[in-house]
Image (tube, rainbow, N blue to C red):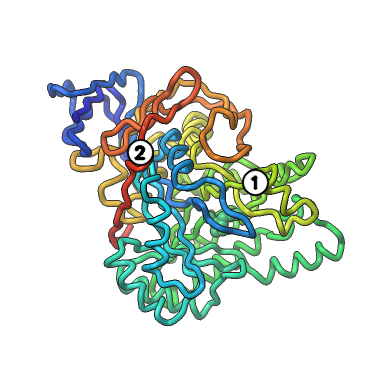
Amino acid sequence: MSLLIKNGLIVSSTGRTVGDVYVEGEKIKAIGRDLDFKADEVVDASGKYVLPGVIDPHTHLEMPFMGTTAKDDYKTGTIAAACGGVTTVVDFDLQKKGESIHDCIERKKEWASGKVAVDFSLHPGITDPRPEIIEEVKDAVLEYGTPSFKIFMVYDFRVDDATMIKLLKETKKYGGLVQVHAENFYVIQYMNEILEKEGKLEPYYHAVSRPVLAEEEAIARAVKMVELTDSRIYIVHLSSGRGLYRVKEARDQGLDVFAETCPQYLLLDEERYKEPDFGGAKYVMSPPIRSKENLDELWVGLKMGDLQVVSTDHCPFDFKGGKDMFGKDDYKKIPNGAPGIETLLMLLHTEGVVKGRISLERMVDVLSTSTARMFGLKDKGEIAPGKDADIVVFDPEQKFTITQSKLHMNVDYTPYEGMEMRGMPSVVFSRGKKVAEWRNDHVEFVGEPGWGKFVKRAPFTGF
Ligand code: URP
Ligand code: ZN
Ligand code: ZN
């Protein structure tokens, strides 16, 4: 199969040019003006952008969590990804007690088998850091193709500082990257006890129980461990201005401290927790969404490069029968997480590019190019000869009002219901195969579950 995309505005992280993209099989073969190739399919991209497929490096597909399971499996989650212009997903794979990293990866690969609609990889989540697990880091980085590991400073499966030190040291040795969920467990425990005594158990108190200083302190502590071990970290789902300040401070010192944020922290503020009829539960995630000033600070961090990546932390639970089933009387029991894999690109374009907060090039960088570099996805993240033909032909003028019934995520709500979008995917290609296209008033999936492949990632080569 060959494909010629004609006359689009081809956007990279460093610039834009009008031209054609020629694809043969699964790879981009040529880029230029008036390319004279005969192709099986020709797409007229006049007036449209030609973007590298988005990479979402933070999802929790089918993850068992807080007594329930995240609702999107590898099929529904990656269909939704394709419809949103996401052509690679790097999913979290939390180790079970007693499990090796190898078995943990093979288990999730098995779940994904025959189901994934776009390419995927895995980040092992280290929750049972036995000595043999620390030793296995070498194989995970160099053989399994999974060179990044998530650790949690909160939840029951958190790691202590001593383990963090060991893991940072070992991971750096082989070219891996440790991703940190940074919140101070004891601050949250203390707040929970106070709120419990006062009978403050509605969803709003989820945010009160996890103050900004819990994130700030944990980031500052993790940074010290990086300094101690001459290693590097990547802070996941950074939510606050003060957290960002700690990242910037470390980077100004020359430390390899990287961070991502997510649309929910850029666009939603803590007032949402006050929605009536338990509606605030829709936004119960950790860290929580913050007060308005934080949102502005995160946009600046994104523009200036102190935040390198935007991910989704897609972890969907139904509102009815999910969020309300477990936590009606106590915010601590509400499953933490929200859906977002399908709305990532449209939100960043509308709220970031159209509103002038970031450039189109910066959007491509934080959604694709830097993400590929950070996580060793060598064949992804750019429209360039030799790269996988993961391409989004994007109509910057297409309007869309976000509503759950026109999205594909297997969940009963979206946090962005009613928001007006400008700019939507027209056609999405995964390794040259059409997987989604705009039809009538929304994007439709036209791919095949099972098409997606597991991608072995390369060690980190610097940023
Ligand atoms: O609330 C969240 N973020 N749920 C998913 C698990 C995690 O910590 O990323
Ligand atoms: Zn987390
Ligand atoms: Zn997460």
Residue type at tag 2: Gly
Residue at image point 41% right, 45% down: 366
Q: Position of residue 270 (x, y in %)?
A: 70, 46
Mark 1 touches mark 2? (CB < 8 Å) = no
In screen coordinates, is 34 left or right of 50?
A: left
Residue located beneath label 1 in the image: 293
Q: Position of residue 325 (x, y in %)?
A: 72, 50
Residue at image point 63% right, 54% down: 336
- SS at mark 2? loop
334 or 154, nearer to the observer? 334
- SS at mark 1? helix
Is 445 drawn above or below residue 172 in the view shown? Answer: above
In screen coordinates, is 453 left or right of 59?
A: left
Q: Position of residue 106 (x, y in %)?
A: 37, 62
| Residue 146 in view, yes or no | yes
Is 178 drawn above or below residue 380 in the view shown? Answer: below
Q: Quadrant of residue 436?
A: top left
Mark 2 surroundings: few (<14), some (14-19) or many (≥20) residues within 10 A: many
Mark 1 surroundings: few (<14), some (14-19) or many (≥20) residues within 10 A: few
Query: Where's the C terminus, which quadrant?
Result: bottom left
| Residue 250 in view, yes or no | no
Q: Quadrant of residue 432?
A: top left
Residue type at tag 1: Glu
- Earlier in the chain: of badge 1 and badge 2, it is 2
Is 189 drawn above or below residue 296 in the view shown? Answer: below
User: Which numbered circle lies on residue 53?
Assistant: 2
283 or 109, nearer to the observer? 109
Q: Position of residue 422 (x, y in %)?
A: 50, 25
